[in-house]
Image (cartoon, rainbow, N blue to C red):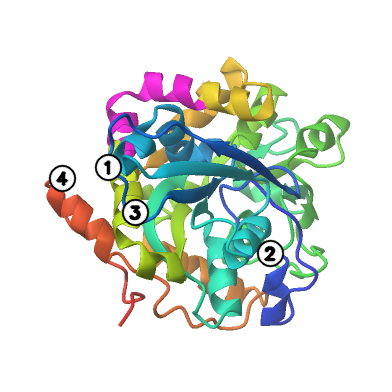
Amino acid sequence: MSAARPLSTLRALAALSALPLLLTACGYGTASTDDDKKTEVAAGGKKLSADEVRLGYFPNLTHATALIGDQQGIFQKELGGTRLKVSTFNAGPSEIEALNADSIDIGFIGPSPAINGYTKSKGKNLRIIGGSASGGVKLVVNPDKIKTLDDVKGKKIATPQLGNTQDVAFLNWVSEKGWKVDAQSGKGDVSVVRTDNKVTPNAYKSGSIDGAWVPEPTASKLVSEGAKVLLDESDLWPDKKFVITNIIVSQKFLKEHPDVVEAVLRGSVKTNSWINANPEKAKTAANAKLKELTGKPLGDAVINGAWPSITFLDDPLAATLDAQAQHAVKAGLLKQPELKGIYDLSTLNKVLKAEGKAEIGDAGLGVK
């Protein structure tokens, strides 16, 4: 769950074209990286209606379903003779741009860019077809300066970027504490310092921030520098669950290749089942894929601190996406969006039924 590139403005809905309003498990940079990586098709596998499917995701722990499903060959096995082509991204807007440009077909992405892409296209470019991860966001602080939640008042707290998922969540928490902060400037009873997750650990070490409301693994990186977890955002949500990573598909690809979409969702469901049945092996597999993609694995202290706070699941937790959007509206960072039709969970529910699992609801935001 990480940050992506900033939005130019958030005073109008157009602002959402550059800033992922509810950015979640996205990456740490600003540019996308097209690995142009094609996996070997399953031996003797039957080709589906498309020669290949182009999948996008982030080299980040909150995208571990994609990392592991790719690394373990689970997606390719389900696709049979249809080839899987993977591209990785470091920013939510980059992945949406790729989807809109017909460069990828399916993507793992946070709620912010999904909302952004859907509303900017007036509901014509994508659907959310499944869930992937929940949680993985914490308020971590300098224990010498902040000992209680009330001590946050008057301090400098970093969020990944103006209007992203964690920024909105922190502003909402501040508001519920009865404190005042100007959302645009970040000034008020708390100083909100928008800082790229890449540099947040250095900002903490230098003393320029007193804490941060950030996704994993940034939170655990700060803990490794001496910070203390003061609040896990999961504790603020019903059942301690909130969406951090969705699966989206272009509406065109969904219409033309439903069998391929079904195969990818089968791969996702089976990957999540494997992750939950084999947490230690899954953690190792995810870190191995991160090393392959970024050249460096996460250290043991960081991944061991981050991994338990992320839940991998098939449910996109639609009600929490709607709540996140409403928090942004409340903060004045988003005009009221029309989200009806953003979900199409019919294929996912078909897969779940075949696996003997319960169907999942869309909180009234599904296709008509």
Callout 1: helix, strand or loop?
A: loop
Q: Classify 168 as above or below 11.
A: above
Report the mark closest to the observer, 4 or 1: 1
Which residue lies under the disc numbered 3?
260
Callout 2: helix, strand or loop?
A: loop
The disc labelled 2 sits on which kind of residue? Answer: Gly
Q: Residues within 10 Å of mark 3 (few under 14, many from 20)?
A: many
Which residue lies under the disc numbered 1?
46
Residue 276 counted in the magenta span: yes
Which residue lies under the disc numbered 2?
163
Which of marks 2 and 3 precedes in the sequence? 2
Callout 3: helix, strand or loop?
A: helix
Q: How crowded is mark 4: few (under 14 residues within 10 Å), some or many (20 or more)?
A: few
Residue at 32% x, 35% y: name it.
77
Magenta segment, principal secondary structure? Answer: helix
Task: Identify the magenta region.
Answer: 271-286
Residue at 37% x, 67% y: name it.
256
Which residue lies under the disc numbered 4?
355
Q: Is residue 251 left or right of residue 38?
A: left
Q: Which of 4 and 264 is in front in this view?
A: 264
Which of marks 1 and 3 precedes in the sequence? 1
The disc labelled 4 sits on which kind of residue? Answer: Glu
The disc labelled 1 sits on which kind of residue? Answer: Lys
Residue 21 counted in the magenta span: no
Disc 3 to disc 1, C-alpha distance? 12 Å
Q: Classify 282 as above or below 112.
A: above
Which of marks 1 and 4 precedes in the sequence? 1
Q: Can residue 205 be seen in this view?
A: yes
